[in-house]
Image (cartoon, rainbow, N blue to C red):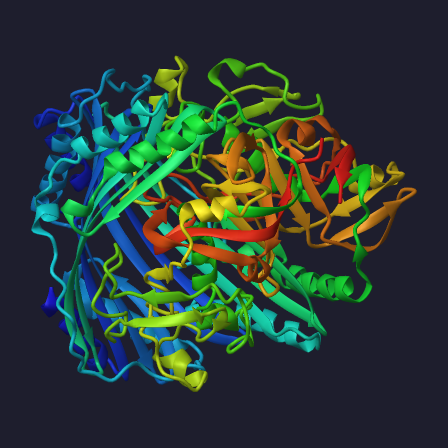
Amino acid sequence: MADPDMVDFAVEYAQRKGATYAEARYEQQASETFVLKNGVVDSLIYGDDAGIGVRVLAGGSLGFGATNAKSKAGVRATVEDAVRIAKSTKRKEPIVFAPEPAVVSNWSVPERMKLQDVPVEDKIEELRHIDRELVDLKLKMPARYMLSTNARITKHFANSEGSRIHSYSPRVRLYYYLTLMKGNDAEQCYRNFGWSGGWEALREWRALDKVLEEARTCQNALERGVKSPEGRMDLVVSPPVAGIMAHESCGHPTEADRVLGREASQAGKSFITPGMIGDKVGSPAVTVVDDPTVEHAIAFYLYDDEGVRARRRYLYKEGRIHEFLQNRETAAALRVRSNGASRATNYDREPIPRMANTFVEPGDYAPDEMISEVKRGVYMKTYMEWNIDDKRYNGKYVGREAYLIEDGEVQGPVRKTVVELTTPMVWGSVDACAKDLDLTEAGFCGKSDPGQALDACLGGPTMRLRNVYLR
Amino acid sequence: MEDHAEAIVKQALKAGAQDAVAEVVVDRNYQIRFARNEPVIVNEWRRTVGTVFLVYNHRVIAGEVTDFSRVSRTIENLVKAAKASPENPDYRGIAKGPFKYARPSVDRKILALEDGSDHVEAAVNGALEEGAKECAGSFWRYHTRHFLETSNGASGTDERVGLYLSIRALVSLESSGHGVSCATKASQFDPDKAGHKAGRIATLARNPKGGAAGKYDIVFDPLILGSLIDQSGGRTSAYLVETGFSPYMKKIGKKVASSAVTIHEDGSADTLARRRFDAEGVPVRKKAIVQKGILKTYLHNTSTAKKFKTKTTANAGLIAPEPFALMCEPGDWTRDELFEEVKDGLWLTNTWYTRYQSYVTGDFSTIPRDGIFHVKKGEVVEAWKDVRLTDNLIHLWSSVKGLSKTAEQVQWWGEVDVPTMAPYALATQIGITKSAM
């Protein structure tokens, strides 16, 4: 059966079996992943995963079935599973979805260098070239690990309300991890770049320059780095650091399913409750958005996995909690409309509220201008260790590449600057954002059970925090 | 399905591969997720997926087969890609079979289970009886069948079943507890006990106050110790050692923990991960990773073992060696004795978000969640919140003073990846930090 026919059949059959709402999502993910381990192409991994996921509302409960069977009989069995398990579920209150119009659409992401047309040997060679240039730096680097993956994701979505959406989304990632040593002292660095589009990604990222620069700064830290100063001072953070702060301390706590307790046992709840819309959480300089419609950012999409049109979401606006990331289920529970944040990692997972490209809105400053106004502080360009508690209140970011700022000038490297602050402390201390928005940084956002590690953009602008405690 | 695995290997050899491994997995897992004391979704899967590992003139390639009508085309594409790929001089072969495998039985009662609602209800009610207000978690019935074939003569089938329940009970946002139940036999499964434990901890954790930074003697509950065992056991993979993701580089034969600590890896043990063979078809077996504090071995597949001039530990994954199940040997303390040893310290019950500043040094932090208790003279005096454990992995294990006489099987979302047998542990002078005011 052809893929679009399969989703149509699944939706129609689910209704016949008693579903009051049904949706089916056929998804194919064709991927190439190659790993360079200390210069050696360790493995080349080809993914070719495809199947159909069927989610239904029946008897007021949700059931989800997934199969990679291509036959009508296989799809029929999965639909029967989904309807049966939904009907067998006992709930006090029925689950309802917020209303949405039916949509018919066909969207795709443009690729300047189509992933399918670039031979795998050329892709591997680009990575090997970066590795050779790294070796030519002649630094003591006992471990070099690089992983590149590119995926072509095709989806057909249909639901019982008449939506029919086809999409094609190519994605590219580069992840590297370097270990440099001086005697027994070690410096490790990690970066992860993401792009929605074709193989032009490596040039757009300026991957070679960035990897070499990263290695040089590690060496610089090993040779010249001093302990980071302790006490209250200003902190200027680069786009990747602002990005992880936005992701952890704004994006996660504004996911509506966390706010409502659906993630309580896994990724946790949120310090934000439904009644806190409009509450102050930071300074007026802080506006954090989540925007799936930024072309070429890793989490680009136009319709989510419930067929809802994507749009820019203002999570924090001018220092106040503004809106949550919603799917149709959470939107109905909170008496609002979905804002198109529902995504699944593949055909075999339910769609839930997720971040896409989350970032602090840029301001008017030039980064140099920001630094020139700092009497004493730290300029943190990258980080290594980070984490945050499950209510998203106590975050920690430890600098990898960081420099002392004195009298408006960037000085020598400082090591392991620890920023261990509460969420209101982070956002309440921000007084300026720069205009240098950079959304190339990417990560995998973890949530749900079974786990759904999903593409997320972790970029932003350079951002300044005043008078925070560092150690 | 044996036919599919065999066909994949034959096709790979015909296409020119020298080594080939195929494993076909039939997945019939079932899950109930619950939150706010009731089910939020029920999931069921019907997937049959083949994984292929093949080597063409020292070029290593892996792929998957989801459409078994296109096996020959998939293999041809993989070999074509392998030909375009550079050689991997580190690759040194797969294990030579045939092998004989143990025949563990599976509990048919688990296979017959079609509705897990009663188990969810038992866990939630258990927590509510202890005073919890809100419960969330998941119930799983695992059932997978495995069919493995290699070009070196290994051939085997396996059936793996299990029941799992994870519950987090909350009295309020900052007063929570967590419990899990893991079983390969229906008669061992105890969701009620998991619920009661989660509820008890949540109730005890009421009205927490902000904790204080410092160095503390800490009693680790099995769930958080499981996370630390997972961190250590996983990072003994030879692959992670080679790539800089491990603090155990050049530490074989050296002290990496206190002499109280012995950790085994054993895929054959009766845990949720029990299996007959690794990804190369080698029969899995028990081995000490850390014995009385000394690092004894890395985890190997055949290829990494040859490179390290040793024998495979039967821990092959598709590409890299990995642990299947980890066991921290119990000690000779009772749980009460461990607490009595704490003059002014903490009892931590769970953690999450473990991240490293440097994997090679082992500097890391992790965030205790659920019940965090201040203990004085062996007694819980108050509940804490908002603290972080900031230490070094080798230092932490070297600081273990005692382990309880009994261990329990734990596994948990994101933190305890593989089933782990964990006792209670007491470690001394462990770093605690907190957010600056």
Whether residue B266 sits left or right of residue A61 in the image: it is right
| Residue A225 pos. (x, y %) | 80, 60
In this view, the residue farthest toward the right is A407
The mark tally for this picture is: 0
**Does residue B38 lie above or below A119 as drawn?**
above
B257 left or right, relative to A404: left
Residue A395 in percent (x, y) is at 61, 38
Residue B65 image point, x, y percent: 23, 62
Residue A86: image location, x then y, percent: 17, 29
On screen, residue B342 versus residue A44, left or right, reads right
Q: Residue at x 34, y 30 (%)?
A: B136
The residue lying toward the viewer, choosing from B231 and B317, is: B231
Q: Is residue B81 above or below residue B423?
A: below
Q: Residue at x 38, y 80 (%)?
A: B303
Where does the C terminus of chain A fall, quadrant-wise?
top right
Q: Is residue A24 above or below residue B279?
A: above
Q: Judge whether residue B304 can be spotted in this image.
A: yes
For image coordinates 68% across by 61% down, the residue present is A214
Can residue B418 be seen at all in this image of the molecule?
Answer: no
Q: Relative to residue A170, is residue B139 depicted above or below?
A: above
Horizontal relation, residue A212 to residue B146: left or right: right
